[in-house]
Amino acid sequence: MLDSGAETECVFCRILRGELTPGVVAFRDAHTAVFPSRHQQPLNRGHMLVLPIHHVAQIDEIDDVVAGPLMTTLARVTAAVKTAFSADGVSIRQNNGPDGGQDVFHVHFHVVPRFAGDGFIGLGHRYGTTELPLEVRLEQAARVATALASPISAPPRNKPV
């Protein structure tokens, strides 16, 4: 964990405290939260971020208490994004460190809805992302919150042979 100064300045911590973009959090529990990415590609709208609610800069700093809930939320959000945006698939990405492409130093996973032929090749401005208005992100958060509240069918279990 970083010092409290990092938490005070961290844009994700500020969003979670309600200081920025009120209402944009689609899901929050004791350990994790979900909200739409501010920058999204035009053909991949519905791009969500899944993160721990307590400031952790990089993935190798996550403790066992948060690791399990974080993966559970990631799995649930993956299904919810597919449902909410009628996606054909989902790409999940986690960037770690400046040389790994991390630009906000609060660990987070990108959950990007994918569609046949969408041409998605990456994250960031150089790949054609644009900043979405808050109203669009609020609508996306509501769609994911609704999908998370609905029972999502579990995948079929492998039958013993």
Image (tube, helix red, strand yellow):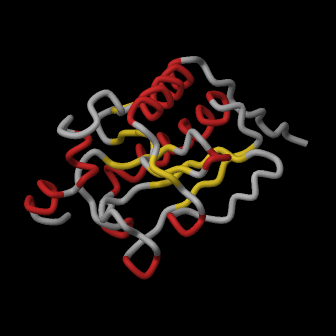
* Up-down relation of residue 83 to residue 78 (above or below): above
Q: How many labels does the image show?
A: 0
Residue 3 in the figure: left or right of residue 39: left
Residue farthest right in this picture: 161
- Residue 86 in picture, x, y percent from top left: 71, 31
**Image check: 12 left or right of 143?**
left
Q: In which quarter of the image is the N terminus?
A: bottom left
Residue 64 x, y percent position in the rendering: 34, 55
Residue at image location 55% in from the left, 62% down from the top? 123
Work out whether residue 63 or residue 132 is closer to the camera in this orientation and state it.
132
Q: Residue at x 62, y 28 (%)?
A: 84
Q: Where is residue 45 in the image (x, y as percent from the top left)?
A: 59, 41
Q: In this view, does 146 lie above or below 134?
A: above
- Residue at 33% from the left image edge and 61% from the top image edge: 62
Residue 65 percent coordinates (x, y) = 31, 50
- Residue lying furthest bottom in this view? 99
> Residue placed at 49% from the left, 62% from the top?
94
Q: In which quarter of the image is residue 153?
A: top right
Q: Considering the image in quadrants, where does the C terminus appear?
A: top right
Residue 15 occupies quadrant: top left
In the picture provided, is 41 more to the left or to the right than 33?
right
Q: Is residue 74 or residue 137 the one in the foreground?
A: 137
